[in-house]
Amino acid sequence: MPAGWPDYTNWLEDWQLSLRWDINKNWIVKLEYHDMDGFGAFTAAENDVAELEEDWYLTAAKITFTF
């Protein structure tokens, strides 16, 4: 990493929980929660280094319909 960047930009540890619910043969619901330590998988092109935090989280939901 460039000089002056925080140490936690060198690693990323991810704890996750994901759930899937098949409502029927056409509908699927998925939920995810990620609790992350570090920022090593991302670049300055994607994020402002001044706004990075060592500990952060991500939540996501997806609904799928197939026909």
Image (cartoon, rainbow, N blue to C red):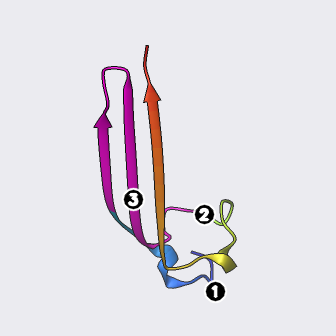
- Residue that numbered label 2 is attached to: 43
- Badge 1: residue crowd in 10 Å (few <14, some 14–19, many ≥20): few
- Residue that numbered label 1 is attached to: 4
- Region rendered in magenta: 16-43
CA separation in Å, label 1 and label 3: 31 Å
- In the picture, residue 45 is in which quadrant? bottom right
User: Tag 1: residue type?
Assistant: Gly
Tell whether 41 sits left or right of 14.
right
- In the picture, residue 67 is in which quadrant? top left
- Residue that numbered label 3 is attached to: 33
CA separation in Å, label 3 and label 2: 22 Å
- The numbered mark, 3 or 2, whose residue comes first in the sequence reads 3
Q: Are marks 1 and 3 in contact (CB under 8 Å)?
A: no
User: Tag 2: residue type?
Assistant: Thr
Estimate the x, y position of residue 42 in percent, counting from the top left.
Answer: 55, 62
Estimate the x, y position of residue 55 in percent, counting from the top left.
Answer: 46, 77
Chief secondary structure of the magenta portion: strand
